[in-house]
Amino acid sequence: MIKSLVRRSDFVVLQKKGQRIKKGSIHLQFLSSPPNEEKNSIRIGYAISRNVGSAVFRNKIRRQLREIINGIYKSNKDFPKGSYLIRVLPGIKGKSFLEIDTFVKEAIEELKDNEN
């Protein structure tokens, strides 16, 4: 089940201790679940600054990212469990949905490779 990161403290811990992967205009930070947390949970937060574009554009990117993550989660049972922070850089303008999808999938594949 995918949940949202909402507490500021969660974002701060992810930024300090999370594993970083950069693919194109997407930066992914990951921290595996602590022992006291439900092992099957995936929590995701999105950081899309105003430099990326208007509120309408940022919301469109956020919806696209949610769709990409849900598709990966449904098709991939070995999706790494833990907390994710997906940062979007201004270079995302002009990128198609397929390019963004490729960036995210490559980042998660690299994450899986690093875990093994």
Image (tube, rainbow, N blue to C red):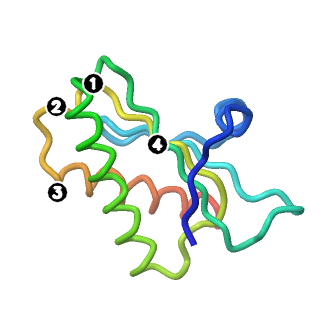
Q: Which residue is label 3 attached to?
A: 98
Q: Mark 3 or mark 1, which is nearer the start of the sequence?
A: 1
| Identity, as a three-letter code, of the amino acid under mark 2 | Lys
Q: Residues within 10 Å of mark 2 (few under 14, many from 20)?
A: few
Q: Which residue is label 1 attached to?
A: 52
* Residue 30 x, y percent position in the rendering: 61, 48
Per the model, the C-alpha gap separating discs 1 and 2 is 7 Å
| Identity, as a three-letter code, of the amino acid under mark 4 | Ile
Q: Mark 4 or mark 2, which is nearer the start of the sequence?
A: 4
| Identity, as a three-letter code, of the amino acid under mark 1 | Val
Residue at point 60%, 56% (across, down): 43
| Identity, as a three-letter code, of the amino acid under mark 3 | Leu
Q: Secondary structure at mark 1?
A: helix
* Image quadrant where one finds the C terminus: bottom right
Marks 1 and 2 close (CB-CB < 8 Å): yes
Q: Mark 3 or mark 4, which is nearer the start of the sequence?
A: 4
Residue at point 16%, 57% (across, down): 98
Marks 2 and 4 close (CB-CB < 8 Å): no
* Residue 78 x, y percent position in the rendering: 55, 78
Per the model, the C-alpha gap separating discs 1 and 3 is 18 Å
Q: Which residue is label 2 attached to?
A: 93
Q: Secondary structure at mark 2?
A: loop
Q: Residues within 10 Å of mark 4 (few under 14, many from 20)?
A: many
Q: Mark 2 or mark 3, which is nearer the start of the sequence?
A: 2
Q: Mark 1 or mark 4, which is nearer the start of the sequence?
A: 1
Per the model, the C-alpha gap separating discs 4 and 1 is 14 Å
Residue at point 45%, 73% (across, down): 73
Q: Secondary structure at mark 3?
A: helix
Q: Which residue is label 4 attached to?
A: 86
Q: Mark 2 or mark 1, which is nearer the start of the sequence?
A: 1
Per the model, the C-alpha gap separating discs 3 and 2 is 13 Å
